[in-house]
Amino acid sequence: MTQNQHDRRTILIVDDSPMMIGLLRTVLGQKGYRVLAATDGRKAIERAKAERPDLILLDILMPGMDGYETCRRLREQPETRDTPTIFLSALTETRDKTAGLDLGAVDYVTKPIDAPELLARIRTHLTLNDLRRNLREMNRTLEDKVRERTRELSASNASLKAEIEERRRTEVQLRENKERLKEAQRIARVGHWEIDHVAGAQTWSDETYRIFCVDPGEGATYNTYLDRIHPEDRVRVKADCEDAARNREPFDATFRIIRRDGGIKHIHERRRTDCDAAGKPLRTIGTCQDITERVRMEEENRQLAERLQQTQKLEAVGTLAGGIAHDFNNILAAIIGYTEVSKIRHAEGGDVGASLDSALNACIRARQLVRQIQTFSRQAETEAQPVSVRAIVKEALSFLRASAPADIELRSGIETASGVVLGDATQIHQIMMNLCTNAVHAMKETGGVLDVRLEETTLEGDGREADGGLKAGDYVLLTVGDTGHGIPPETLGRIFDPFFTTKRRGEGTGMGLSILHGIVQEMKGAVTVSSEVGGGTVFKVLLPRYERRARDRSSEAPAVKQGRGRILFVDDEPDIVRSGREILTAFGYDVVSAAGGADALRRFSEAPDAFDLVLTDLSMPKMSGLDLSGRILAIRPDTPVVLCTGFGADVAPETIQAAGARTVIQKPLIAGELSMLLHDLLNPGNVN
């Protein structure tokens, strides 16, 4: 959308907060939008009817008439019912969002707002509204043209009838008319034919001969007609023809015929039989049309509709994944917190300490997996680093040996020097586990052998199908084979399609191999599969070999750095509050915990100079971390404030700056990382 288009766009902000109106006015004004404002629902309705804005940003919690009622009334007004409305609210519950969308809002954005995201959504919904408006106008124009064309066709038909009547009077005109008719039938791929039952004669038009792939020299007979019909359709067509003739009903059917070259045509045929008073057939006339192209286009449209539905499902999965990842982050934060507290209490080591180390390292890998889910939910790019595939495969095999059924034999062959690629360690782990768990599932009833191989290989030629069409070069080859039931040929070509699965309901989503295929392609690699029913399946994953050494991407937690000072720790999750308080205390800090923004603000207001740093969750009900940061800094501007978030999306730097926070860190927090950050903030002259 160009700047000139922005100049013509008007946005109405409805919010009882002058600060929020001012913020939105600044953000929108910088992008060239004309901004209107209203502080309550009634004023908003009056202004919307008078000014006709292009889009409305509507708060929910307002005195008097709330946002829900305002939206409902806007939808009732003819002047504003089509104006797109976006709710801006601090309410984050699903039922709040659902209620807003059910009232007709086009979107729901939670506060605090991310300015770039909000601007992107505004642009999207303005564009969608333009498209809907243009579509309605195009539909009206098309309907007008159809009506006009219908009138023209009606007039043309009347003229054609008069012309036909005139042509009967002269043989010359009749011949001309026949030639024109032949040409019209050729263009429209419509033929006609006639059977004279009294004379026992049958005639076909030239186009009918072409449609049925019959040489005119062979003559037109009923048997010739039946011989051309596809064997699977022949009995049905013959029975329908006889039923129509017996019941004196028109015949209308679609069927296939076989061309001389073995190809298939789709035919639509209509016929009618005229009988005498006694019911004896006198004449049958009919038309046939080659609708092969139409059938092809209908199939393409169907496939496009399926792809659109799959895309919408993927978008829904992405949204769901982001929400689940956030909730899981909170759970993981508590697990990591209590694990690290226990680790600190058992610092002397031993079996307990080793077990806690293993649990903590597993939690760190889980954190990486959650971040990958968050990356998927917002369609962002992952960070590619040199990774040792060998180490990841060995780790996955250790897990599989412990978890695979006893009747499945696990074999492996891993070359010592193999396996450095440029990619994401968690994604490579996902590839390995996806292929192996699928193999185990294929052998769960009969048992068998799961064979995993990792080696380096060199492709000599470019674009060979057996190598997935890759260019010549050095690659890392991961092979996963099983002796399970195999994959039928008719299914093999669809296994990488999103949502395609042969598993029973509840056993799979059909997304595993689709995501795997996408990861491999993003890494400039290829995945191939060979399978035989009853003979097992072999997957081969080729990834470009990386020449440099793999960076040490160890999942072990960094060492804890002790510190001194008093910290106000704020979170709305009780488990995180308890575990965070114990961890920070173990670091050497004096900790005051608060269950939410209001509690934290009260404690800080009572003794502003008693706290050296504030560590607060970003997303909390009633008062967010951004709001709390602003209020704390209004009381004591030099207070270091650190925001924590379980969401994957980055917080805009200008948002952090506006709130006055020093930085934003991702949940779940690891003790070593957190202790280093706190030490650096509280000792600015000795930053690590």
Image (cartoon, rainbow, N blue to C red):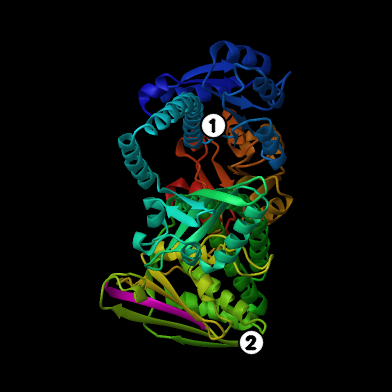
The amino acid sitting under disc 1 is Pro
The amino acid sitting under disc 2 is Gly
> In the image shown, does 675 or 407 lie closer to the viewer?
407
291 to 221, vertically: above or below: above
What element does badge 2 sit on?
loop
Residue 310 location in percent, x, y? 54, 53
Res 555 seen here? no
Residue drawn at x 70%, y 27% as measured from the top left: 68
Q: Could you tell me if the residues under marks 1 and 2 are in contact, i.e. CB atoms within 8 Å? A: no
Q: Which residue is mark 1?
A: 637
Residue 541 location in percent, x, y? 42, 74
**Rounded to the nearest whole Å, what is the CA distance between mark 1 and mark 2?**
67 Å
Numbered-mark total: 2
Judge the density around disc 1: few (<14), some (14-19), many (≥20) Cα neighbours within 10 Å: few
User: Of discs 1 and 2, which sits in the foreground?
Assistant: 2
What element does badge 1 sit on?
loop
Residue 466 location in percent, x, y? 36, 76
Residue 2 location in percent, x, y? 36, 27
> In the image shown, does 589 or 77 lie closer to the viewer?
77
The part of the image, by quadrant, that contains residue 334 is bottom right
Span highlighted in magenta in the image: 472-481
Residue drawn at x 69%, y 46% as measured from the top left: 593
Res 518 seen here? yes
590 to 181, vertically: above or below: below
Indicate left or right for 183 with 281 as reference: left
224 to 537, vertically: above or below: above
> In the image shown, does 152 or 498 lie closer to the viewer?
152
Indicate left or right for 195 with 350 as reference: left
Q: Which residue is mark 2?
A: 447
Main secondary structure type of the part rendered in magenta: strand
**Between disc 1 and disc 2, whose residue precedes?**
2
Quadrant where the N terminus sits is top left
